[in-house]
Image (spheres, rainbow, N blue to C red):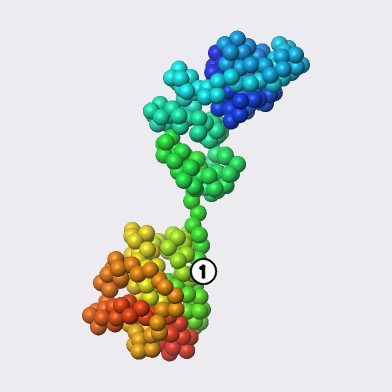
Amino acid sequence: MSPSPNRLQEHVVSVVAALLTNRVSTTDLEQTVLDRLGGEAYRGAGGYRAFAEAIGVLLTEGRLKAVKPRETNGLFPALPQLLKRTISRMGTDPATIHVLLSQLHPAIMTTHYQRHPADLADDRQPLDALDRYLRQSPPSTVSLTVNERSWQLFGDEKFLAGPDGARLLNRTGINLARLACHQTHEPFFYTTGNPSATAVLIVENKDTFFSLQQAFRQGQTGFAGQDYRLLIYGEGRKITRSLAFLSEIPGCAPETLRGHYFGDLDPEGIAIWHETATRFGHWQVVPAVALYEALLAVAGPRAPALRTAQRQDRAALTAFLAHFRAPAQAAITSLWEERRYIPQEALHAAWFADVMRAP
């Protein structure tokens, strides 16, 4: 159904209220109204003649003023070429707020803006973008990535995934599914192992990943009675974000797999495991106990002092130690208190070649 001429008046008021500056050309103002309604609805509401009538009302009320009255847009009825909004915070009175909110698509919740009208001015442009998208016909059937949809709607590929976008969606009750878009996960490097195994091995550092990869490629995917379906390169702290990519790998449902994490035996490595296990608490990510115990056995007596200062997270250490038996707990605690560490590179390619086993 096309909007009535009175409805067009409301759209003109809405556009004027949302202006970022107090000056606007009549041509730009009309184009914005036309873009919002679409050509067919704009013509059905009376087109330019109804638009000119709406501008005339605002001029008569003093809400708009001609900057140079003698310079017109050359159309009939003629309008001033350049307009000035005379009330800087136009649209904050309850009546205008009601008009603005009533024009939005029914799927957009407006309760927040009724309670906090000052936020409407800040959100007006993205609200208009949401409104235009929701009114398009037919609706989008292809799911885009969040960044792709964000660029399409707002001209900013980072908006939807950022705090401003999250706040807008929360205020309006619109979710990503309604916008036909989806989150993407930062990928990680991985090597496949035994497809029937129910555990994956995550390693912190690049050298250890490549050393283990050699063994995996020889079919040696097991250690200390545990076989692994995947070998994942954690890439330091990146794994605290990228582990979600596991759900993108065919046949790897994270809820059916157990993650074994193996990193440097130092405060940073322990903190990385703890943050990963906490962030992905709906999965199971535990320390690779057998590999850490091997690390202690091979290099414990040679453990050097930490090269750089590292923040010690006592909660992370406590959670980490809970997975070990008493002798390993004591050894790890001593390293922690004496500010010594063991890099995972102490277990090298030749060592892995000797101890890794085929399924």
Image vertical order of residue 88 relative to residue 56, above or below: below
Q: Is 24 placed left or right of 17 in the picture?
A: right
The residue depicted at 54 percent of the width and 18 percent of the height is 10
Whether residue 309 is visible to the viewer of this picture, yes or no, is yes
Which residue carries the number 1 mark?
A: 189
**Residue at left offset 37%, top offset 63%:** 275
Taking the spot 50% from the left edge, 33% from the top edge, the residue there is 122
Q: On the rendered image, what quadrant is the C terminus found in? A: bottom left
Where residue 1 appears, as percent x and y from the top left, is: 54, 19
| Image-based side of 214 in relation to 77, left or right | left
**353 relative position to 13: left or right:** left
Q: Nearer the viewer, residue 149 or 308?
A: 308
Looking at the rendered structure, the kind of residue marked 1 is Phe
Residue in front for this viewpoint, 16 or 84: 84
In the displayed structure, would residue 205 be above or below residue 164?
below
Label 1 neighbour load within 10 Å: few <14, some 14-19, many 20+: few
Report the residue at 72% width, 17% height from top: 68
Q: In this rendering, is residue 173 above or below 145?
A: above
Residue 304: name its quadrant. Answer: bottom left
Residue 65: image location, x then y, percent: 64, 16
Q: Position of residue 84 (x, y in %)?
A: 63, 21
Res. 41 visible in picture: no
Numbered disc 1: secondary structure: loop
The number of discs equals: 1
Query: How far across and down, in percent of the image, does residue 312 sit?
Result: 35, 69
